[in-house]
Image (spheres, helix red, strand yellow):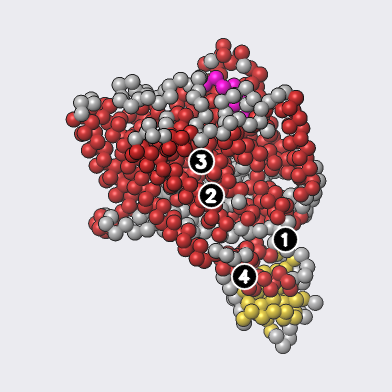
Amino acid sequence: MASNLRDILLLPPMDGATINGWIRIPSSVVILIFIVTAVIMALTAAYFVWKKSGFSRAIRKSLIVAFFCSGLLFLAYSDATWYGWVVEDMKTYSGYSTEKKTKIFVGPLFDFITVARTIVKDDSYSVYSYDIATGLMVQYYLLPKRNRSISKYVLVLYDNDSYYDVGDKTFVRQGRRIENAELLFLYDPGAFILGVK
Amino acid sequence: MLVSILIHKETNVGLLERFCLSYPLGMGVLTVQMFLLALMRVPLTLWSVAVPILAEISGLYLWTRKRKIPLTRKISFDLFGEILSPDNHWMKRSVLVILATLVVVKLGSIFAETYLRPIFAWDSFANWSAGAKAFYYSHGLLLDAAPEDFFGKGLLNRNANYPPHNPLMQVWISLWLGQFDEVLVKFWSPVYLLCMSVYLYLFMARETSRLISLGVLALFLSSPLLSVHSIEAYSDMPLSVYMLLALIMFVHVMRGRNGFWPLMGLYSAEALFTKDEAPFFVLPLLASASVFIWQNRERAIASKKEILTLFMCLVVAAPWFIFKFSHGLGFGADYVTRELTFRPEMIWKVVSLLFSSQNFNVFIMFLPLLIVAGWPPSKEFLFLLIPVACYAMFFVLVYSLTVFFSGRLMFNTAIFRNTLTYYPCICLLTVMQMKHIMQDPLLPGGHVNEDHHTLPKTPG
């Protein structure tokens, strides 16, 4: 709580939207909004009572005033961050084609995917990656080509269980052995594409 | 044209309002039609989808000509009039300009962001766009594919249980583009927001004043999660639009504008075709409407034909549910388990998150306060509150009574995302209650429009 109160004056920006995420507004800002709401309600209610409005009517009016004041505070805070994101995205993505924007968003993995698109001639491939998310990302960008357990093309992305012997042209993964696997593309020693004859 | 025909007796609906009502309605009708074409194994090409649409537009146009139904009404720019009017105090005019600028810039920035970014959220890829891509390239819904691929089941983590409204919108855009464009396929999303915002503004301006309406709209649009969902290919935004429009149509019919019954039915049906949680809003809404009809039996008998159209229009969602049940598709994500538990402490967690002002402006915090301050609420307000409250309560029950939702799910994400679907309704209820408070004849300034049946001219 102490840190929250100290942060009120610093007004840290809200966190960005992440994959599967939600937007976290620092609790210090939320506390600030609560305080502003309470103070404005109290002040305006007192003002309206002083203006001989009657207590009940004063409360009603002060509630509406507090709604707009705290709402505007929230707006100023959240929109400042929002426009920060917009400016950042303009710097990052503006003026590029969709393909380039996707490359910027996905990063180096997209180079691998772009090559895979041209190399994989069939409508299927097998992908093995170091984590599920990367594998799924590859699958998404390679659509309508589909990931199948058996295919003429094998895509490997830093998968610890995969082993490829260049000399023997043999690919081994979890007891499964594929002979005659030609190296079609080598991105780096951990990321490559094989063609199975 | 469909909107103009359905509400041809309502002379008070301006062109802008018609446009705002038309886009969500048209998108829903379009995707249902694409779904039916795909069920009939007609390949989804631009030709096969657009020709029936063109034929329908021509048919509707001839219908309007025959029945002499005017398609357009005069556009009024009353907001500009109010800003430019020398009768208004300079301060009010300045505030109107500032608020209008805030709204326009925010909406513009949302469109700009949509254009800047490719699809970026993981569940957009997995749940919606993977299916859209596969449907687009296969010119169908993969209904004749192997069981593991049926209806795009095996694509990434796609849940085949979900209604195909969202993927089919992406397919429709792709058909026009001639390719699946990672940036442009989601452009339907900000347009939904635009239509919702403008319609909400026009409705609220009628209820209160342009100043209040514009202020509330600016606050509404400042909610971060709403902005993020509006630039991405999620389904929560379209669902929130359909729910809001169905609720506003209910307001109209409660005020004797019977032409809105079929629209209420159509938006409800389209909500059912958008996301699996929609029945938990639509059923309480229908229950609320039924109670309203029962309480106004005499008036209802006189307009039974119009009321019947409400239920007839719900048939639009029937093909999806027939398909769903005939193929054994369940509700919600297929990884959801139905193991029950009892964790009442989750209720507190939900409440504390909702009132924490995370992701949403202060509407959720103030609505209960406004209800208490304006006690007793009007009957009309209660009819509107019940479906929204039932829908919100449904989520609270799910979070506290199921093992999956109370423990295994990314709890905060789910809560905020579900809240987003009824957040515009919360905004509407807040304004309605604010109007109720301001109508208090004892309150100075209680000058808002009180006569529901003789509506003022269309606000602009």
Judge depth for marks 1 and 3 and give the one in front: 3
Q: Secondary structure at mark 1?
A: loop
- Residue holding disc 1: A144
Badge 2 or badge 3: first in the primary sequence:
3
Q: Secondary structure at mark 3?
A: helix
The answer to whether one can see residue B66 in this image is yes
- Residue holding disc 3: B197
Residue A105 relative to residue A143: left or right: left
Judge depth for marks 2 and 3 and give the one in front: 3
Judge depth for marks 1 and 2 and give the one in front: 2
Instruction: For marks 1 and 2, give the CA distance.
Output: 26 Å
- Residue holding disc 2: B230
Instruction: State which region is magenta.
Output: B255-264
The residue depicted at 41 percent of the width and 43 percent of the height is B97
Q: Are marks 1 and 3 in contact (CB under 8 Å)?
A: no
Q: Quadrant of the N terminus of chain B?
A: top right
**Position in image of residue B150 (x %, y %):** 73, 51
Judge depth for marks 3 and 4 and give the one in front: 3
Give the vertical position of B2 relative to B164 (above or below): above
- Residue holding disc 4: A110
| Main secondary-structure element of the magenta-colored stretch | helix
